[in-house]
Amino acid sequence: MSKKPEELRSHRWYGAHNLRAFGHRSRTAQMGFDRSDYAGKPVIGILNTWSEINPCHTHFKQRVEEVKRGIWQAGGFPIELPAISLSEPFQKPSTMMYRNFLAMEAEELLRSHPVDGAVLMGGCDKTTPALVMGATSMGLPFIFMPAGPMLRGNWRGEVLGSGSDTWKYWDALRAGKISEADWQEIEEGIARSPGHCMTMGTASTMTSAAEALGLTLPGASSIPAADSAHPRMATQTGKRIVDMVWEDLRPDQILTPAAFDNAIVTVLALGGSTNAVIHLIAMARRAGVPLTLDRFDVLARRTPLLADLRPAGRFLMEDFYYAGGLRALLARIPHLLSLDCLTVNARSLGENLAGAESFNEEVIRPVGKPLLACDGIAVLRGNLAPDGAVIKPGAAQAALLRHTGPAVVFDSRADLAARIDDPDLPVTAESVLVLRNAGPLGAPGMPEWGQLPIPKKLLEQGVRDMVRVSDSRMSGTSYGACILHVAPESFVGGPLALVRDGDLIELDVSARSLNVLIDDAEMARRRAAWQRPAPHHGRGYGRLFETHVTQANDGCDFDFLEAGAPTVEPDIY
Ligand code: FES
Ligand code: MG
């Protein structure tokens, strides 16, 4: 132990002999706590993103009690602080609009309360980056407690995966391959337990990345929410955070450039979501690590995809857990990781991987038999994306990775919805579908519209993939030759704004290029005629968002939230 009780941050609230401290103590007594319950103990803030409309976090109501159990046992004083839930299936236009909102809330909850350390309870897509971003900015010791994936879905004995199978069977329904009755059965079988999406979507990607960063207890991110190992992990998390406070183990000791490389390699080896690119850049910059898109491309060239998980592969997170989980996967690739990185349990990543083994070589493949040798994510540039765009080559039909075709342009999501299934739409399998005004400012909130639907008439011909380009994001559970995060976005005058129907668009993933085949003079003519649309929000949070959100290649954080200025402690008198 390096800290003394009088050195605890909470001591300034509870320990002083003044009028305000009297108030803090009398009001704690009002809540039924005796002085001996908290005096001289680390106060642990538990940021709980439970809500009655977030199915991924339903178990948090119980799980928070298990976290508290651990905190009490280790001699801490737990206080549960509810935070906005960011319910991926329900909140519109996209939880991406609110990631920074939760990040701010997390930071300010920790700053304004008598908190010495924190447990962050999250898992559903944006909650992981948001909580980590906020807690990193605050700088107190914290542990991330991942929600865990839900159990495998089931329909007539067929395994169903979150998201991925929704898209697959929706296309099957539209193509007349399954009935409305089948579709309703699938609706009732695809999500059978608490927990986040159990494909390698954004949730599993980001909780795994958090573990690789050293922010969870070892193995925590792979445990299904419904498994009894999950509450045991929650209790251990509660125990550990108390010691972390005494040890003063802070995020700046954990979140180094090497730790972010470990997280990127992990995402790539898992076949993780493209959303990780945006989130990890934002998280890194909160920690003062100047991560850019190019680092993803560099690491992708040497990282094999070893986890055979949907949407890139066949299995689900429950299978991954039984196969040994993330520790087993990382133990396969020690040569690609910085093993000396410190983690929340005060041990190195390498020490935490000791003894890990894979129990199923199909789910967690050996390095010599990868699902994909490299290029889990590729960063593209060219005259259509001067600041970059991303694609997940493993989720696309290989033949499309080098493709030139005429653009079919949609100006908005509404335009797309109105025309995509029109039998007269001049579109063929060779066309390149373009959606613009779907980025951070254009939509706004950068929703997951990047997996543009295949036109119905082409679906009926058996077409299952096409090259699609947008300034939008794509759900981590999606697949297809979808070029995403085009920056700068069309709404701010990125070249995507200037593309017209019939322009030839050339994609070459091996050359990392994305170009529209029109000359500079024509581009300049079109640019001169272009006018920036008016902002969507005149007031409120939407206005704050539109005024300060950065572009996708910069992580879509608010410009004033990135690292730089020191954390200001409140005057507590
Ligand atoms: Fe919560 Fe997918 S809906 S993780
Ligand atoms: Mg998602």
Image: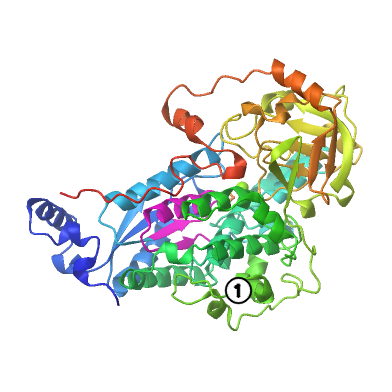
Quadrant containing the N terminus in the rendered view: bottom left
Q: Which residue lies furthest to the top in this view?
A: 529
Is residue 280 among what the camera can see? yes
Q: Which residue lies furthest to the bottom in this view?
A: 355
**Whole-percent x, y for residue 265 in the image:** 65, 63
Q: Nearer the viewer, residue 66 or 96?
A: 96
**With respect to residue 43, does 430 lie above or below?**
above
**Whole-percent x, y for residue 60 in the image:** 44, 57
Is residue 224 among what the camera can see? no
At horizontal 57% and vertical 51% (from top left) the residue drawn is 281
Alpha-carbon neighbours of circle 1 within 10 Å: few (<14), some, or many (≥20)?
many
**With respect to residue 529, does 32 lie above or below?**
below
**Whole-percent x, y for residue 30 in the image:** 15, 54
For residue 545: magenta? no
At horizontal 73% and vertical 23% (from top left) the residue drawn is 418
In the image, the segment drawn in magenta is 119-148
Q: In which quarter of the image is residue 346?
A: bottom left
For residue 137: magenta? yes
What residue would you read off at disc 1? 327
At horizontal 58% and vertical 35% (from top left) the residue drawn is 440
**Whole-percent x, y for residue 248 in the image:** 34, 69
Amino acid on which the number 1 mark rests in the picture: Arg
- Relative placement, left or right, of 17 versus 496 is left
| Ligand 1 neighbours mark 1 (CB distance < 8 Å) | no
- Relative placement, left or right, of 264 versus 315 is left
- Relative placement, left or right, of 255 versus 114 is right
Q: Nearer the viewer, residue 301 or 147?
A: 301
Q: Which of 36 and 192 is in front in this view?
A: 36
- Relative placement, left or right, of 439 versus 17 is right
- Considering the numbered disc 1 on the image, is that residue within a helix, a strand or a loop? helix
Q: Quadrant of residue 259?
A: bottom right
**With respect to residue 304, does 284 lie above or below?**
above
